[in-house]
Image: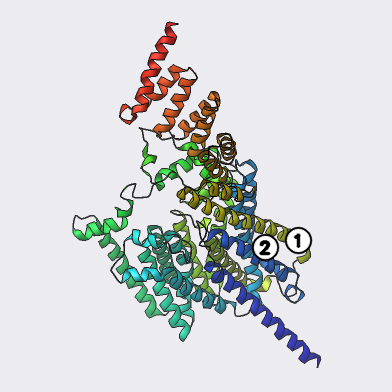
Amino acid sequence: MKTVQSSALADGDRTLGSRLATAYLAAMLVGLHLIVDPRIYDVSQLPRLLALLVGLTIAVPVVLCLPAVKCRVDGSALRSPIVAAAAAYLVACGLSLVGAINISAGFTDLFRTLAAFLVLCLGILVLPLDHRWRDRLLEMAVIATLVAVVVGGWPVATLLLEGWPSRRAVEELLLEGMMSNVNLFAGFLLLVVPWCVCGACVFSGPWRGLATAVGTLATILIAVLQSRAAWLGWVAALTVTMATLLRHSQELAVPPAVRRSLVRGSLAAVIAALLLVGLALTDTPAGESLRRLVVNRPHQADGPSDGGRTLVWGLTTQMIIDHPIGGVGAGNFPIRLHEYFGSDRQDLPPDFSRLSSHNWMQPHNDFLWVGAEKGLLGIVPFALVLLLSLLAIRTILIRSSNPTDARLATASLAALVGNLVFSCLDFPLDRVSHQTVLAVHLAVIVLLERATRAASTRPLPLPGWLVAPPLLAALVLGITYAAAALSQEHSVMIARRAEHDGDWLTMREAARQGTTPWKTLDPLGVPVAFLEGMADLRLGNHAAATACFERALAANPNRLYVLQNLGAGYAQAGRVDDAIITFAVAADRYPSNVEVRHNLASALIDSGRFAEAIAVIEDVPEGFRTPGMQEALLYAHEAAGEQAAE
């Protein structure tokens, strides 16, 4: 009787473990990425962060403190160097805020990094509770990819009925079902498609057919989305996968006939690539079409073909040089970038003025972004996570005797390489969806690498009641922040719509409701206090508006319109010296802006500093001077002459 009872209990434990592993995979790979809020500018960021933090708040005590689970959890895999490097990056993210201009600007990054770290740790702890976790992972990944293709890509299919769509047409769809960004949606697919390919190799029957079909559709969608960063990532992932299949064909159980086909296919792909490059260099219609698709893109005709990336990378590199150890602080890159706008000034306006916007929230390169915001303290562990993961995959491919494990490792290798290349041209680090899926990949790598040496690994029980309280406290803080930030973004959208409609009372009230110390900048880096100040200014409350602009200046001291309106408020209140200081900062940050220089010159004239005003105006090439500046210049010359005569 005791034996039967023990067996029933063991079966119950296995069922609970299987359910937990399935719930973890379903939430991390499918459910989370369907959460959107169409009432805000970025439909995915904060809603998914809030949902993830709430889910983790439930999962942490269940895994660490629930007796039926805690007794089966083995924490020895958490000793992995990958986990240590991820923890070090989390610490660096928090430490970077110590010297930041705006601490609240970094909270999204901090809590997103915390959530990704906990997803990694929970994956390591929960997945082994189900002895079939490898199959569950691939099944859920196929479902996740299918959902992404259907929800995010079905509008694109309507464009394909009319022929190959333009990039602008694809962008106008916004893909709000996933993350409202074409490039990042394509980057998300790079992380899940390798699992589909692996499933097509591992599964049999209906699952194999589904994995093959879904992987093919997702690959086609990557092509149609026309994200050059994703294309490069896909090529890199494919190249590494082919090389791995050829190098480790025995470990991956690749039949000789398939291996020969891979060799021939690889040679054909190289020849085709060379022919396409050669064709693109010709003046034929086909060559012109290729150049328009890859280089001279119509939707970027009014700016650099790279979207201004190389220019911003140069400014970001200078920022790293200026702040090498701890960086400028998480979330503070868009604030500090404005300080470098005049660093490469050759004429007026400088090259930066060719960009469609000065409002860069990220440098479109995650490695430069981490280096700029977290310095060496951040970039070292950030790079170590990738390096250690690649080394662990190498160990799996060499030591594992299980072809399925080797294939899973190869899938994660393809995803890591694709994401690495994509990260050099875009900003997947900014997205909750990308960080979550990447954390699952890392958890898989840790577990597979551990399986190669499981016989020598001793189980490590976790002190749940000691670890859970601080984690829960951090998660509650994150939930509080995310809820406040989400509420703020709702208010900001109302304020912006009211501004468009000229409803200044509604705009002011919405901005006030959106004011919170948890987050002082809106999704575009604009201080919420600035929106309130603009409403007060329109309502004629100049003193209140100036006070709002001063608060906005503390939140983002380099924002052009904050500086402009604050300087104007000072000038109107007779605080000419304060106006001069404010306009001088604006002129230094935005040397190509003629209006700023005109305002500075006017303030100098009001202060009787005519020679300085003349120098400011004459620094602007004559062809760029407005009629008002010409009049101010003539007046300053006359006044300076009279002043000298006295």
User: Quick one: label 1 or label 2, which is nearer the N terminus?
Assistant: 2
- Which residue bears the numbered disc 1? 469
Residue type, label 1? Pro
What amino acid is found at the position of numbered circle 2 in the picture? Arg
Crowd class of label 1 (few under 14; some 14 to 19; many from 20; radius 10 Å): few
| Residue at the outermost left position | 284
Position of 480 relative to 138 (above/below):
above
Q: Where does residue 439 sit, x and y in percent of width and height?
A: 57, 64
Residue at 74% from the left image edge and 62% from the top image edge: 467
Q: Nearer the viewer, residue 385 or 303?
A: 303
In the rendered view, tell whether residue 225 sits above or below residue 583. below
User: Any mark on residue 389, and which?
Assistant: none
The crowding category of the residue bearing disc 2, from other C-alpha atoms within 10 Å (few below 14, some 14 to 19, many at least 20), is few
Q: Is label 1 in a helix, a strand or a loop?
A: helix
- 392 sits left or right of 469 in the view: left
Q: Of helix, strand and loop, which one carries label 2? A: helix
Q: Are marks 1 and 2 in contact (CB under 8 Å)?
A: no
Q: Position of residue 442 (x, y in %)?
A: 57, 65
At 64% from the left edge and 55% from the top edge, which residue is drawn?
A: 481
Q: Position of residue 315 (x, y in %)?
A: 46, 41
Q: What whole-number distance in Å separates the C-alpha atoms at marks 1 and 2?
A: 21 Å
Q: Which residue is mark 2?
A: 79
Residue that appears at 43% across and 82% down: 209
